[in-house]
Image (tube, rainbow, N blue to C red):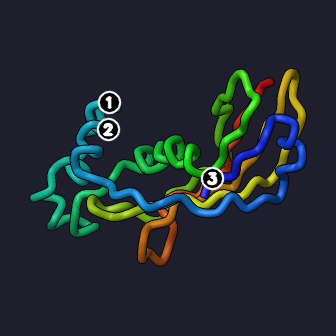
Amino acid sequence: MTTTITYDQLADLAGTDLGHTEYRTVTQDQVNLFADATDDHQWIHVDPERAKDGPFGAPIAHGFLTLSLAVPFWTELLEVKGVSTKVNYGLDKVRFPAPVTVGSRVRMQATVAEVVEVRGGYQITVDQTIEIEGGAKPAVVARGLYRFYA
């Protein structure tokens, strides 16, 4: 469920649990495209046959691929009306506790930790966790920094 607010309501968003996104399946095609984009063709990502005998029993997504899914997940969690510009300002405390094997389903949970006024807008700090369906540990734990301008 998407939380929809106006720009004027951003200041009161701290402490808000934005809930979970829908699950998305991580495919080998995604992993291969990411490998091409980043020039990271390590066999644990792009060689399914060899990866079967590797440490994870299957090919795994790049950690940064999994982290990048936060971008489309955001469109499911938060919509702020009345803004001229939204930017990803940065990340803090990024960790990859568990690998995501190809074919796994992942989703994101997010909670707004802090909202501060910045020149011309607001910066929100968001604790976000990308979970693996059925997994004991999350795939990504990160604190995202996002800016909204009127």
Looking at the image, which residue is at 39% across and 57% down?
A: 24
* For discs 1 and 3, the disc positioned in front in the rendered view: 3
Residue 140 position within the rendered picture, expressed as x and y whole percent measured from the top left: 52, 57
What distance separates the C-alpha of mark 1 from that of mark 2? 5 Å
Which is more N-terminal, label 3 or label 2? 3
Label 3 belongs to which residue?
2
The amino acid pointed to by label 1 is: Ala
Give whichever of discs 1 and 3 has the lower sequence position. 3
The residue carrying mark 1 is 37
Counting from the top left corner in percent of width and height, residue 125 is at 76, 46
Mark linked to residue 34:
2
Q: Which mark is residue 96?
A: none
Vertical comparison of 118 with 53: above or below: above
Judge by depth and name the residue closer to the eye, 15 or 65.
15
The quadrant of the rendering that contains the C terminus is top right
Check disc 3 and report its element: helix, strand or loop.
loop
| Secondary structure of the residue carrying numbered label 1 | helix
Q: Amino acid at mark 2?
A: Phe
Badge 2 element = helix
Circles 1, 3 touching at the beta carbon (< 8 Å):
no
**Distance of label 1 from label 3 (alpha carbons):** 30 Å
Marks 2 and 3 sit apart, C-alpha to C-alpha, by 27 Å
Residue at 36% across, 48% down: 62
